[in-house]
Amino acid sequence: MFTYSLNRLLQLVVTTLGVVTLVFFTLRLIPGDAASAMAGDTLSGEALDRLREQMGLNKPIWVQYIEYLQNLITLNFGETITTGLSIGGLLSKAIPITLAIAVATIVLTIIISIPLGTLAAYLAHKGHKTLDNIITGGAMLVDLMPSFWTALVFLLLFSLTLGLFPASGTVSLDDPAAFLHRIALPVLVLSVTQIATMARITRTAVLEILSEDYIRTARSMGWSELRVLFRHALKNAALPIVTVVGLSFGSLLNGTIIVEFIFTIPGLGSLLVNGINSRDYQLVQTLIVFYALFFVSVNFFTDLVYKRLDPRVQF
Amino acid sequence: MKTTRRTFLTGLAATGAAPLISFPAKAQEKTLRVRFYDDLAGFDPATIFRVENENIAFNIFSGLTTYDSKTGKILPDLAESWETKDNITWIFKLRRGVQWQKGFGEFTAADVVYSYNRILDPATASPYRNEFTDVKSVQAPDDYTVVITLNSPDGNFLHQVANYHQGQIVNKKAIEAAGKQVRWQPVGTGPFYLDTVDVTSRIVLKRHETYFRGPAPISTIIFQIIKDEATGTIALRRGEVDLVMRSNREENIEILRKEGFLMNATDDYASAHKVFNLSVKTLSDVRVRRAIAHALDFDTIIKATSPILQNATYTLLMPWMDGYTKDIPRYPFNPGLAKKLLAEAGYPRGLSFKNLSTSAQGVTEFQQFEIDYLSQVGIKMEMELVDTPTFNQRRNRGDFEVTTRLLPAVNPDTILFSFLDPANISPKGLNGARYDNPVAIETLRAAKAEIDPAKRKALYAKVQQIAMTDLPYLPQYANGVIWPSKKNVTGVQPNNLAQVNFFEVDIK
């Protein structure tokens, strides 16, 4: 286990370095840079060159790469090119907000999707096709809805028509109640898609287990259906579900980008959109490295949970 | 103001001595919440960019002159009056007792000298340095007088010292104290000071209590960053904000209009022009450019695509600008004449050109109509879509066959010199057409230098007539600006730079 963990940690470092390099060069392959994004409509070509020089964008690309790696190793994220503000400072404000949204979404998703998926599997197993089809079909339909569209529909319904949640406003962790109220709608939007995906996976996994011999044995021992379902079937179906939860974190980070934009949440997604729009290499690179680190870390921990759930898993 | 040739022109105009608006005797505590959509990039006048960042700076700083929000007329700001007899030496008499925000003391002529020299200093790397390249010297003979000497006469110089970009006056001590954070620690003499800023969520401006025109009616302005316009519209309908900064989508504007929100607007803020690259063989023939003009029916296109926010336009300058004339050659919709011109130019079977545009917008409805209209006379408009920074880069370098440019400006010289002066041929400047007509530029220089208003007007008219005859740029449409607000919000008047003077805004 220890050797495995060490190996995975090394892989994590190599993967991250790969991502850093790829992102660095890919960003610079895209035509246009921070200076041309800043220049906008009205700066002449010559004025643009002066701006580029001032922003340090005329240095050779390999010099920029080495400087970037040096800064990254020393955790000096530097300043954004367009605002001159400390990237570390911006991240420290944005990370808790995005993480709070992601964690709240995952928790809500697990609470709703796993019982729902298990129920659908049970209904299918018992031959209640209509109810199963309603749950499964509904989940597929929701799964297909793009999050920007869901976000706008939820805004119109829950914010404008019902007046339950704000559409805009300050997002501050200083007031937890106001914070939760403010992020409730984005969390709902993100959860809807996640619930649909996870309920379908849970249904498939549990349905497969329900046909196993040991489930029949459990039933023959006179245990209640609930105990059979949740203690035996669900527990043994946990591996694919855990995998999906791990992967969901990745797709959730994607989802937050759109949802944060629409609900004006100042999280990592908003920072990334701003950075991309203004070709702020420094900011985008740091954010993508953070996203990559986060993603491989979640995968790493998912693997560790596997071993815990099923001692037969060999590394 | 006297207008004879040899006498002084003085800015001690009727408007100069009077306050712009009356303000309440006792300032009340009122908070205005505004939807802000732009990316924040800072408020240092030397390096500021993006129109809404500029709107914040417009309310923090002052210039020697400013603009009447409604008419666009030049008004005194930090300068109480001014005079010149040759459009070369400009003498500004400054207001006394003007206080800097945040306790930086009293404003004097030395601040003007510092501010302008800072723009001119190559180390500042200000993109607005070119606006002052004609400035020979800036001197302060006493604390309340500034003398600016130019290299050549400029009848529009009052625009260059207005409350915008290079014209905004900064405080030396505040600039030095802010160091690298200068763009986030602006200190001006305007009606509001920057209280707090969070680049991802909001900007808070507070009333400058000792503002020289008196305290503003609003005590706090919270600019809430809401990027998505649909969300911004919902926020206004829900009462989360009082005012939406610049609504750009007709469907949102229509919803708000029907629900009785105020449509605070200015028409004809800036016009968009089709830019023909004259180094392209087909486009170098004026008959081809005229054929394109005759083939397009902008009136109809705009009625179909953007009837609220746009108007068709036929001139290089906006009607409210100094020197504007409507007495210019026009190219009414006439497909038959377009075909005839093409045949005369040697293209009886038509031709094609590439139109550079942004992928962010895709092929807009407007462009779809253009493609269709042009195809009816045998012209194929091929769309070349690239991402926005690439678009800006290529357009500014002149790397296109045909493109569109909308250049917001108050000073007519900004538009005319940018577009028509061969010294500004891309990539050096914005003359993307590569237009080079010695008569046009000589006439333009003469117009800029002329003191006599009637002669000046005639010369500017001649420049526009020449340009519209040669047609290196084809006017397409003029954009309007709309800031929807609640009914109880008064005084929101976007000016000709699409900026709102919040000193004039109140909540009833």
Image: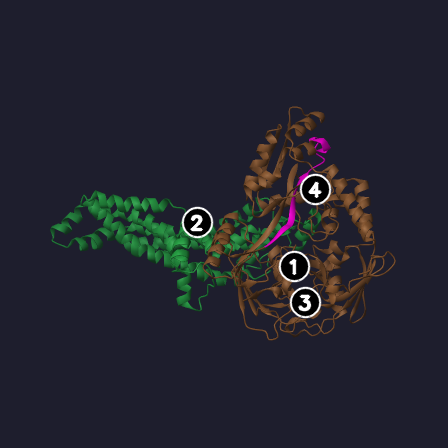
Chain colours: A green, B brown
The residue pinned by badge 2 equals: A148
Position of the N terminus of chain A, as image quadrant, is bottom left
Give whichever of discs 1 and 4 has the lower sequence position.
Answer: 1
Camera-side residue: B306 or B41? B306
| Residue farthest toward the right in the current orientation of the protein | B6
Q: Residues within 10 Å of mark 4 (few under 14, many from 20)?
A: many
- Tell me if A206 is positioned left or right of A181 in this view: left
Q: Position of residue A65 (x, y in %)?
A: 58, 51
Residue at point 15% right, 55% down? A224
Residue B196, position as x, y percentages in the image? 56, 67
* Distance between mark 3 and mark 1 Cα atoms: 29 Å
- Say whether mark 4 and mark 1 are on the same chain: yes
Q: Position of residue B371 (x, y in %)?
A: 58, 34
Residue B177, quarter of the rendered image: bottom right
The residue carrying mark 3 is B175
Q: Report, in whole angstroms, how far the alpha carbon at label 1 lies from the one at label 4.
A: 31 Å
Badge 4: chain ID: B
SS label for mark 1: loop
